[in-house]
Amino acid sequence: MISFIVKRLLTGIVMLAAITTVGFTLLYLGGGDIARKILGESADAQTVAQKAQELGLDRPVLVQYGDWVVHALSGDFGSSWFSGQTVSAAIISRLSVTLSLVIGTVLVVAIVSVVLGVLAATRRGWVDKLAQLLAVLGHAIPGFLFAVGLVLFFALTLGWFDPTGYVPFTESPTGWLKTVTLPVIALALGGIANVTQQIRGAVIDALRNDYVRTLRSRGIPERTVILKHVLRNAAGPALAVLAVIFVGLLGGAVIVEQVFAIPGLGQVAVQATTQGDIPLVMGLLVSTGVIVIVFNLLVDLAQGWLNPKVRLS
């Protein structure tokens, strides 16, 4: 198990190194005249050149990247070129907001998909038709459009939720729940569509196996057969899809946060990328990459627990 974890961690480190290298290069090539963006169009050429030299933008890109790597390895990601706030402070202050949305969405997707997928595979009928309808809607309706519809109906028309804003959990658990419910639902629709279909198909395939007939012939209750044996074998493919969905949610949350005016990483990412704020964008890349690596490691561990063959692959 230890070697399994070490291999996954090494793979994650290589992936993170590749992401930061490509990201830094693209930012450098497409950032434009960042010094002028900081100082404004009225700044003279000499002042702009001095600012570029102060930020180290006059050095070769490899030298800049190497300098960033050395500081990043020591935990120093620098400060924003535009706000002056340290990158760590800018990310940490908003990371919990985005993670609350993403983790909440993953939990909703997992619970609803398991229940709906198992029922669709075992009972068929209207439950199966509902699962198929959700699959179509989840793929056909863009997330941001669904989010706008939720705001118009549940917030503005019915008044059940606040249309915009965010209340921290530590300030008011009830207020926090009211502000994250609609964003989580908006993010979860597409994930539920994908995972439900995956679980439905995996459960149907598992029910056709010989071991299921053997268990039934021994008089083991159907509920035990499904929950203890069938669902465990069907969970592997669903976890793989859930890992992909988690990565997509980190990007999808950017749009949903804009719709609901939630002060998460989305607002910071959009602004920093537009301005060409390289230290802040690189900090976001690293933090997002680490989150993805940790989540994928947890999924791999769950896969290894469900199927020992995974640990040997």
Image (tube, rainbow, N blue to C red):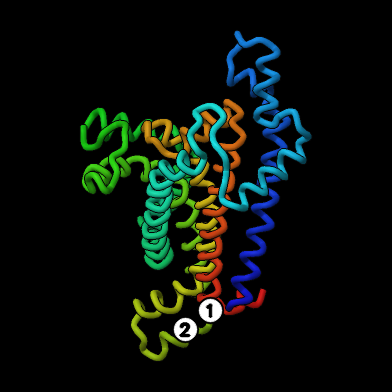
Q: Is residue 56 above or below residue 74?
A: above
Question: According to the image, label 2 marks what residue?
Answer: 213
Relative to residue 162, is residue 198 drawn left or right? right
Mark 1 Cα shell of 10 Å, populated few (<14), some (14-19), many (≥20): few
In three-dimensional space, the C-alpha distance between marks 1 and 2, rounded to whole angstroms, equals 7 Å
Q: Is residue 34 above or below residue 105?
A: above
Which is nearer the eye, 69 or 289? 69
In percent of width and height, residue 67 lies at 69, 43
Residue furthest toward the bottom?
A: 218
Relative to residue 223, is residue 95 drawn left or right? right
- Residue at image coords 67%, 47%: 69
Which is nearer the eye, 293 or 104? 293
Which quarter of the figure has residue 41? top right
- Residue at image coords 24%, 44%: 171
Residue type (three-letter) at the residue carrying disc 2: Arg
Query: Marks 2 and 1: in contact by CB < 8 Å?
Result: yes
Residue type (three-letter) at the residue carrying disc 1: Asn
Which is nearer the eye, 21 or 67? 67
Relative to residue 36, is residue 252 drawn left or right? left
Which quarter of the figure has residue 244? bottom right
In percent of width and height, residue 114 lies at 40, 62
Question: According to the image, label 1 marks what residue?
Answer: 209
In percent of width and height, residue 154 lies at 26, 35
Q: Secondary structure at mark 2?
A: helix
How many numbered discs? 2
Q: Is residue 281 above or below residue 299?
A: above
